[in-house]
Amino acid sequence: MIAIETVFDAHHPLIVCYNQDAWVNLVRALMLDVKEFLVKYADDIFNVVVKLTCLSEFHQNTLSTAVRIAPEVFIPKILTHVTIILDNPALLNISRDEFSLLSWPEGELYDKSVIESGPKIDDKIANVRREKAYSYKELMDELELRKELEMKKKQVGGNKDEPKLTKKQQELVQNQIQKETATRTRLKALDQQIENACVMLMACLRGERHSTKLNIPFILEVTVKLLQSALSAPRIASLFISLREAVFDEELKDLGNLVAHSTLRLLDPQCNLPSNWCEEALIKQATRAIDEIYGRTVDYQPPGSTQETSYNPFSAPTFAYLFYLLQSILNGAKSGFEETAKLSCLSVISSHASLRSTEGDENDDRRPDLLPRRQMLRLCVKVIGQTTGRMQQAAIFALQDVARCASNTEPGSCIAQQEEIDVLLEALQSPAVSTREAAIQGLSILRKTLPKINVDRENGLKVIFRLWVARFDIDEGTSKLAEGLWSDNQLPASAEIFEMLLSDVVHNESAIRQAAARALSVALDTHNSHVAEILEKLLDIYRKKLEMMPPVLDQFGRIVSEGSPDLFPARCGIAMAIAQLVHLLDSAQVEHLFVFFVETGLQDRNAEVRVEMLKAAVEAVNKHGKDNVATLLPLFEEFLASAPPTASYDAVRQSVVILLGTLAKHLQGDSPKIKPIVARLVSALSTPSQEVQEAVSNCLPPLVPSIREDASELVSQLLELLLESENYGERKGAAYGLAGLVKGLGILALKQMDIMDKLTAAMQDKKNARHREGALFAFEMLCSMLGRLFEPYVVHLLPNLLLCFGDNNQYIRQAADDTAKAVMSKLSAHGVKLVLPALLTALEQDSWRTKCGSVELLGAMAFCAPKQLSACLPSIVPKLTEVLTDSHAKVQKAGAQALLQIGSVIKNPEIQAMVPVLLEALQDPTRKTTVALQKLLETKFIHFIDSPSLALIMPVVQRALVDRSTDTRKMAAQIVGNMYSLTDQKDLAPYLPTMIPGLKQSLLDPVPEVRSVSARALGTMVRGIGEKGVEDLIPWLMQTLTSAASTVDRSGAAQGLSEVVGGLGVGKLHSLMPDIIQTAGRSDIAPNVRDGYIMMYIYLPGVFGEDFVRYVGPIIPSILQALADETEFVRDTALKAGQRIVNLYADTAIELLLPEVENGLFNENWRIRHSSIQLLGDLLFRISGVSGKMTTEGADEDDNFGTESSQRAILSVLGAERRNRVLAGLYMGRSDTALLVRQAALHVWKVIVTHTPRMLREILPTLFSLLLGCLANQSNDKQQVAARTLGDVVRKLGEKVLPEIIPILEKGLESSHSDQRQGVCIGLSEIMASTSKDHILVYADSLVPTVRKALCDPLAEVRMAAAKTFDNLHQNIGQRALEDIIPPLLKRLEDPSQSEFALDGLKQVMAVKSRVILPYLVPQLTAPPVNTRALSLLSSVAGESLNKHLGKILPALMSSLAEKMDTPEEAQELQYCHSVVLSVVDDVGVRTVLTELLGAMNSQKPALRYASVTILQSYCDQTRVDYTDHVPLLMNNLIHLTIDTNVKILNASWDCLNTIIKKLDTSDMIQYISHIRKAIKFAVSDLKQGEELPGFCLPKKGIAPILIIFREGILNGSPEVKESAALGLGEAIKRTDAEALKPSVINITGPLIRILGDRFSSTVKVAMLDTIGLLLGKCSATMKPFLPQMQTTFMKALNDANRAVRLKSADALGKLIAIHMRVDPVFTELITNVKAADDSAIRDTMIQAIRLCLIGAIVKLSEKVQKDLIQLLESYQTSPENSTRTVAAACLGTLCNCLDDSLLTSLLNTNLLETDGSQDWTISHGHCIGLSVALKDARDKVLRPELEAKIKKTLTTFASADRIPICTSALRGIGQWLKYQVISNASIDVDLITVLVKAMKHDSNEVKQLVAQAVVFVSKSVDEPLDISILRVLVPMLVMGTKEKNAVVKSYSEHALVTLLKLRRDETVLQSCLDALEAGMKESLAEVVSKALKKIALQPETEDEDLDNTILK
């Protein structure tokens, strides 16, 4: 009792302020359970509270505590009580005056109208109370105005007494005051109740926020409506704001405030709102709220996340709170909200419809049953019915989402309540098709929750009824959906729905009436026993609906009250129902029905009802006429006979006539009644009603056969009426009638009755508009009636129809348009093929009118049948699009109108709403395409896209696919992908050829998003049409997949192929994957191929998801292998693929992933290790939930960023053993040999691990197991990694672990496994590197022997590792390491069994400590015998420190090599030398090596020279050092060695030179030409005159090395270089023998000829010709393949303007002739050229060329050529020009050697030996020159015995001539003869000597000089001295010549004496001569000898001068 008594007192505000749990503590102190106590006494406590008029804070606090402890008991009680209070209808029925009374002073009259008139006051009050449409502000303004008026009255009245009221008035006032007081009291009581209700709700909120939150949807539903009550609005508004605290957390506090106040402002409550929230514009404020809600729930992205945005809905109560904001915006109560905001509202609804509950959790605030689903559905239905386009689609999707959350088909969804189902059932009665369709879709989703008739009969029957009607909806899509839902739920067609169906038959909406009529008919098919009953009910309902209450009029005829409206829609529905069920009637019912039709139905007051009744009646006649002719015919005839002839009966009379006509087809063909009936029908055609005319037209065809004889007359009558009548209705009716008659007569009637010709003529009648219009009417009706039968005439009709489209008369244009529609609507597929080409051709014509007509006809094709439409639109729309750019405005307008027509037949409502946008895109593609695409993408399609829709969409998309804008192409590809799920594949087929190229192009776009969207589009396409539809696509993708062009192409192809394979299904994946895996794993293919296949691994997993799991394991090895690829782009692709696999399958396929990644951690390839760590990191990040993207750069390597939670996650997923193994491998990666691997491992370790030392201790056993395995591994990298890790562990865990580790490692060195010994060494190195010197000194005694032993280990890897250990040891213990280790190693060099190992040990030590070790080793190794092997091994690792010792090492090496020359050890020794010199890589060392080697080349010892050259050759060949600066010096020395006499040295120097030159860069070779020329000249200077260089004469070698440089200079050098190169080459050729030159001839000749053929300077050509001449002189036979080219080149050069070029070419041609087998053509060409030459200088050169060819020719000339030559030369022999005469005469002399004897004899006698003094001296001169040259070149043929005397005489004669030229020519001939006599050992003719002596006395110094020259010439011809007798004659003559004053004569005489006396040899001849001479002459000779000759004899002999001066120089 204490607890119950204190329950309220203990909740006093002061007590609660101090301790809110005071009462709770009290109860507990009483040993009671607080909750049980409250549950037990809940009713008692609550009843006390409820009975209170006003709730104090005591009671509020009590309720809060009760709710907090037992919410499940008290909250329902409070909500029930509050609902009772707030559901009071009186709260919403408070008038303005009633509310004003609350503020009016008590006892003061408010309504003063009672003073004037009581009744009026009552009426007014009554009226006011009915007034509801007022705002709170208006009410307050009025109340304030009343108070102000009262105050003014009092102020104005002052102290005046108020007017006294009569007793009656006082009584009325008192009564009114009492009424007002009662009203005030009632309102205050209501206000108090409202206050109590709000207080209770706030107590709930304070007591238990969460439980209150769960009831927020209910609370809001009860309270929000009261905001429209002025009495309750202030408190409810305050409550609404307070309730936000229940649904918005602290972090959403600001959003809660914004939502609460903006919602209240939108709800427009009848109270004032906080002014600070009303300052911002309402639209802006509400939009801001929606944007924030949208961002938090729909477009949500967690902080720091890079994933795509997703739904993140609020709780259900929170949504219920903000739903009123969404509802206010979407209801359109406030205009001005943008569509974007409304779409956001719908998206928010959809996102919250995705809420699902947690099973078994009643306190889950995300339960969908807490959502205000009924209001959500009602709102969506309203939006769907009121909007179009995106808004409508978004609302449809929202409705479906809401239905889905109540479908009970998904985990966490709830069960829909009946009130929600009722919302959708009501929506099925909407006039909007979209609303009805959406409702059916919603019901389909809720199918499992729909009430069953056997469980809930009322509601189940309601569902059956509404779905039954929906099955027959006029919209095909809706009816199909309803049919599917009906079948899925297996609903029964109950007879109980008939009454319900009748209610829909008379529904206000036409669509519902039509559906109900059909539904009723089908229902009666099943229950036909109800037909009569239903028919009667329909007729009864009709009669009731026909009644109309007339308006009430006053006495003046004014309307007092309106009459009832005409319910004609209901009657229309009844007519439709009757039409649907007439097939179920029997004969009696038919008769009864027709009586109703004739008497009532067809006479309805409303025309629309009459039309429907006529249709029903015609249907009844068609169904039952045949069986009821006898009954119906009299009925119709009687009516027609008895009906009054008034206008009111015209309509019924026409209808009966139509019925009569319809019935007449059932009469016998010869019935006399048919003709009158036809006449009536034809007469009825004049009725201006389309329905009547159409009905008549349909009646006529079956009747025409019976009146065939009158048909012609009827046709004529109708034609006349059609073309001549001025009445539109009559002409139209005539057209209908004519069509009916033709249909009845047959298609042939058109021709037989000349109908077509008449109509065509009328159509072409330009003067009569009625004719044209009438003809068009006729054609329209003929097309409509005859259908495809009229198709053959359509093609002929088109030209005229085109013209009518451009007619000036608008009525004719309209008629043409109607005709076109009729034509097109009836065309077959064949008809389309006939018509379309003609129309498209017409577009190409110039006439704009024709174009317009064609365009309009094309537009009319929109009315074709759907099948034909889909076939023709792909051809039509592009053409119409082209028309939009026509130059004529009307054509453009027609095109736009035609496209609009196509748009008008679009059935898809979403596209229909977008038609203007699409047409703008077609008209202005540049600016409007993007807008159209955006609209398409924003549209959510819920209807199938039909063919007309595609026709407008696809041209826009096709253009966009090739647009330059990336965004445009992306959107286009997205649309293409969406199309295949929204339309029939057959409709899309025509667009494939134009779409696929664009998609291919987009697939290779540089922008990844475009490629991705295009790939998905292709996948969707293939999924829709199958592989056969795109047969060429997959091969193209496979080809592009391996493209070498770019990574972008391969990426696009991979993505496209993945999507295509996804479209083809898993089967295709299984067939392709083996080949993909195999190819991706191959290493023998191009990188781009591997890259393409690896890319498939990036995209296939995303396409196939879990279906790809089975391939995760097999593909990882190929990914890891690709990660190690040499090509960077392959590695990048592989890494992306690996990361993709990890991201997708980290959770589901970890058992497949982790083993492969672990293996990769220890792979020998560092790239694989690096990538494996990256993948492992991604995997661990994924498992642990961290991003891994934090930066760890700059942090210490021991700083960690991991968390305990991530460690627990990893441990739970991997397990302890695998976790340890993974982390141990990761830790070893921190010490990897590769920097990138170390960095990656360190980053992952830092992010994952929380504390490094602690983690190391945890994984230490596993880590050491891995370390030992790696230390013993054959992989060097693994050993080093393990060793470094070991050292790192030592650093991390301290040096206290050394005593345990070092003994183990020492023992390991004794292992029989060499790789383990190597690992021990590496480990020791790392430990020493990680340990202090003091600790190492402690273990030095054991470490030194260990290292020494390891350095001599049999395994090279162990020795290498030991050397590094030695390095660490030396760093720590210093000199002791050298003293204790190096000397023992040197000693072991002497032990054969260990020398090899010891030597390699030294080598390894040298590699790490060369600067320290080398000074110890060099003196010992270079001492004889030189240990070249050791030197070679050590030098290779000595580095730069070797340079200081090269001065000792190189001489030792060369001397050792020289000693072993020509021994078996030579090759090995040479190899050692090579190793030493090749180890030198720095500039200083290179200079030293070359200096030493070049110095040795000059050694006097051949062996040393050979050694130096051989070493140099090897060095130059194999070194990578740049020795370019030394190349000139090397060339000079090596070329100088070519004069060596030792063949081995020559060959070695040649090889060395060849090596150096081959390594030169081609572009640098030219600079060495001058160096080579100087080197050759320097070498030649040591040789005798003309002697060849031995080094250039090596067989098969020759000048090949330097030829490369000369050839490069000739081909690519500048003109100066070319000249120098050619000259240099010539110099080399001179010093090379023919045999050595042969291999190089081809390489030399080609470039020379090529350069000669180009336009270069004369100096270049001269050099080239000179070189070719030299080559021809030595290797003419070898050059025979070039004979044609050389001949042509030389001939061309003979015409060169430069003399030197001509002379050189002549010389070369003379040498070339030697290899010519057919010389006649050459001479013939030369003869021709000589004759053609205008320039005497050129002619002279050509003649000399003939002479040189005559000298060189080895083939006999033909007789003709001989004669031609004689004739030619004789013609120039006597030329006045000295040069021409000389060369021609000389050539003639040479020719003597080639002539036949007869020709020669003739030539000698008639020319050369002719001495006629009377001739001009020039003739004699020519003869003398010819004879002189003949004695030189043809002496064997000329000096015949019989001619010698004559020749002598001739020469003597010429020698004595007074003309110097003749004299000198004769002397030259004598010189030649004397030489011949000397060399042939014949006796010298004294007479000739006498001539010389005589000539020496000639006055001319020139003659004297020539005599001395002749003596030299003759004496040099033989080595032996001339006969003494000759000397006795010649010496005195020459002695006298030495005394000549002329210096030249004197000089020549002195040189002649030296030569004649052989003084350069000795003085033997001189003594003999002195003895033979007379005393005087003897003295003179002796004097000359002593003075001059001895000096001359000591000088070098000058070059011989030829006596023949006829050769041009």
Image: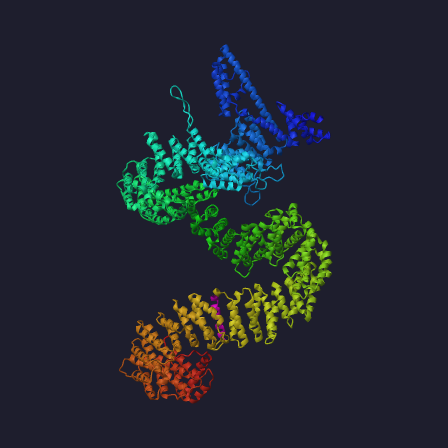
Q: Position of residue 353 (x, y in %)?
A: 55, 39
Magenta segment, prevailing SS (helix, strand or loop): helix
Q: Is residue 1489 above or below residue 729?
A: below
Instruction: From the viewer's perspective, tell me whether residue 674 is left or right of residue 1468.
Output: left
In which quadrant will I find the C terminus?
bottom left
Query: x, y (%) of residue 10?
Result: 68, 26
Vertical order, 448 against 1693 (above or below): above
Position in image of residue 812 (x %, y %): 31, 40
Horizontal and vertical percent position of residue 1158: 63, 55
Q: Image check: 99 left or right of 23?
A: left
- Residue 658 visible? The answer is yes
Left or right side of 737 for 1032: right
Q: How is the image coloured?
A: rainbow
> Magenta stretch?
1565-1582
Is residue 1579 covered in magenta? yes
Q: Quadrant of residue 1900?
A: bottom left
The answer, for residue 807, to whether it is visible in the render is no
Side (left or right) of 1699 relative to 980:
left
Looking at the picture, tell me which residue is in the foreground, 1629 or 544.
544
**Quarter of the image where the N terminus is located:** top right
Front residue (pair 1287, 425): 425
Q: How many marks?
A: 0
Q: Residue furthest front?
A: 630
378 part of magenta stretch:
no
Q: Nearer the viewer, residue 821 or 669?
A: 669
Asked which quadrant contains residue 811, the reply is top left
